[in-house]
Amino acid sequence: MEIIVVGAGVSGLTTGIRLLEEGWSVKIMTEDVSPNTVSDVAAAWWYPFLVEPVDKTNKWASETFDELLRLKNVEGVECITMRKGREYLDEICEPPRWSLELPHFRILDQEEIVKKYKFGWEMEAPVIEMNSYMPWLLSKFKELGGTLELQKFNSIKDVSGNLIVNCSGLGAREFCSDDKVIPVRGQVIYIEQDPGFGRFDQQPETLTYTIPRRDFTVLGGTAQKGDWDETIRDSDTEYILSKCEALWPELDRKKIKGVAVGLRPSRNELRLEKESIGEKIVIHNYGHGGAGVTLSWGCADEVVKLVKINM
Ligand SMILES: Cc1cc2nc3c(=O)[nH]c(=O)nc-3n(C[C@H](O)[C@H](O)[C@H](O)COP(=O)(O)OP(=O)(O)OC[C@H]3O[C@@H](n4cnc5c(N)ncnc54)[C@H](O)[C@@H]3O)c2cc1C
């Protein structure tokens, strides 16, 4: 039986690869492919940001961390690098549970903390260069025998096939009538300057990051809930730069190379479950918020488990 995966963002491609590795025949059907998906805009730092429920997402994030490291170290995927980053916080708090799984995580000394903050930690995590990683995922999917067809569906009922994996991201609002999925708009800036280590304020209200890649550093960010505007706003560019300069005073505006916008597919809880619709079995895998890359391999493995139970 052929499994139809709807969507070719990081979720659809990763899930497609895992299903092919299990020996199933897989076709991706999708409205758009890279570079025209939200996944292409991801910054992308491994970090479980804006996603629930944490008891599940912590596990999937940790599994993805291990797989990204394996891809880098064993398969030699060059667009995954390990970088250090420091997160600054307003209050002293318990570190998140996922930090227990990281090979490098330490609380910062007082003199390492940027002045306006009270607390912070340093971690090392994968940075994924999506401009290379998305084409790499697509070619891996094809190498394994996967096929891809461009098609937009108005409804899940229009998909032929009895086993469908729904990786439609924000498109799930229309595709399976789920108005719990909402956009959280993010704008980023690309700058040809390396900050040495990443700097982060991960509170959605004050969100700030400088994520060093080999080509550019990605500066962010914004997390504008319910905002559908995909155009670049100069006011946001200025707002992001002023926040980043507070954490990284050496930032040189002359080295800016570009700006991009994406709409995170946010949901009160990521939806990864089976649903029966008439004769069809649908496995949903969408609503990854600000962590679709961070959760990609863990979620794909979970889809495989659900497919096995339901075949
Ligand atoms: C500015 C920004 C920074 C980010 N930074 C990070 C980060 O550092 N780390 C991280 O882990 N995540 C980050 N994210 C979040 C991450 O980008 C998303 O969680 C992830 O891309 C979601 O992937 P997806 O495959 O589920 O959805 P998408 O990439 O949106 O893919 C959905 C796919 O479904 C297709 N589709 C939709 N509807 C239909 C339909 N009706 N018919 C056919 N096809 C359809 C689309 O064409 C597309 O191919 C960031 C996001 C933004 C915007």
Image: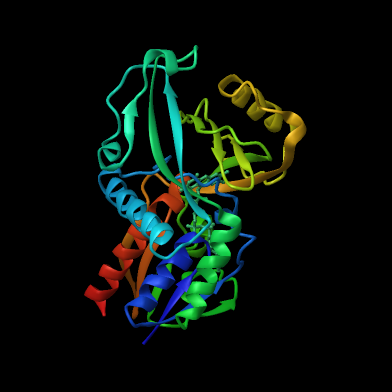
The x and y percentages for residue 307 are 29, 73
Quarter holding the C terminus is bottom left
Q: Nearer the viewer, residue 165 or 155?
A: 165
Q: Residue at 34% of width from left, 81% of height from top? A: 279
At a point 38% along the width and 53% down the height, the residue shown is 295
Taking the view exactly as shown, the residue that stands out farthest to the bottom is 1
Which image quarter: residue 217? top right
Residue at (29, 63) in percent of width and height: 302
Q: Can you say whether 200 is above or below 153 in the image?
A: above
Q: Considering the image in quadrants, where does the N terminus appear?
A: bottom left
- The residue positioned 43% from the left and 28% from the top of the image is 87
The residue positioned farthest toward the left in the image shown? 309
Taking depth in this image into account, of 164 and 254 the one nearest to the observer is: 254
Q: Nearer the viewer, residue 145 or 289?
A: 145
Nearest to the observer: residue 225 or residue 20: 20
Q: Picture coordinates of residue 131 (x, y %)?
A: 61, 57
At which x and y percent is residue 123?
38, 35
Residue 194 seen anywhere in this rendered image of the structure:
yes
Report whether residue 176 is seen.
no
